[in-house]
Image: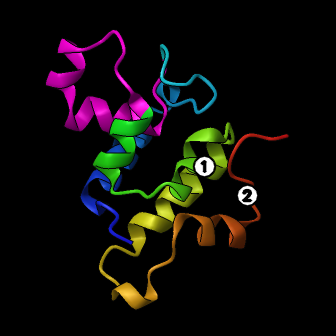
Amino acid sequence: MNYNYQAFEAVLEKILEQPLEFDMSEWCGSTKCIAGWACLLFDNENLKKNRVGYNFTAQGTKILGMDFKDKDLFLTNDNEGVLQILKILVSQKDLPASEQQTIHDIAEKLDIELGLPF
C-alpha cells in the first residue's frame, strides 16, 4: 500500500467541514465525492484547464495513492460508511506498514459493501 495519507486527511477534513458538499452518489457533479475533493484540492489547476474530459476517477486514484482494487471505494453510495472508512484509514497513517489496513480490509471489518450493488 502506498496510500497518500496527507491527501486522504485533507479530503476527510473538507468533508467534515462541508458535509452537505459530500455525496458519493453524485459522481462528482454538483457535490463532491472523494475523488472530486482530491482533484479539487490537489489538481485544481489541471481541473480548471481540462474540465471537459477530466477523469476524476483516474486522477483521484493517482492523487490518493490507491490501486486498481481500491477504486471500489469510489463506486459506493454509502456516505456514512465511506466516512467511517476514511476516518479509520487516516487514523492509521503513523502505524508501521505491516499494521496498516487496506480500504477493503477496513470495509470488510465494518461490514460495508464497496463497489456498485448488483
The residue nearer to you, when weighing 103 against 20, is: 103
User: Which labelled disc corresponds to residue 72?
Assistant: 1
User: Which labelled disc corresponds to residue 112?
Assistant: 2
Q: Which residues are magenta?
A: 31-56
Q: Residue at x 41, y 56 (%)?
A: 66
Q: Is 27 rendered above or below residue 7? A: above
- Left/right placement of residue 53 relative to residue 33 reads left
Q: Main secondary structure of the magenta part?
A: helix
Residue placed furthest toward the top: 52
Q: How far across and down, in percent of the image, does residue 84 sit?
A: 58, 57
Q: How far across and down, in percent of the image, does residue 69 sit?
A: 55, 57
Q: Is residue 60 magenta?
A: no
Count of numbered labels shown in the rendering: 2
Q: State the SS at label 1.
A: helix
Q: Quadrant of the N terminus?
A: bottom left
Identify residue type, mark 2: Ile
Q: Badge 2: how crowded within 10 Å, few (<14), some, or many (20+)?
A: some
The picture quadrant where one finds residue 9 is bottom left
Identify residue type, mark 1: Asp
Q: Badge 1: how crowded within 10 Å, few (<14), some, or many (20+)?
A: some
Q: CA distance from mark 1 to mark 2?
A: 11 Å
- Left/right placement of residue 2 relative to residue 91 reads left
- Left/right placement of residue 10 relative to residue 117 reads left
Q: State the SS at label 2.
A: loop
Q: Is residue 34 magenta?
A: yes
* Front label number (1 vs 2): 1
Q: Is 13 rendered above or below residue 1? A: above
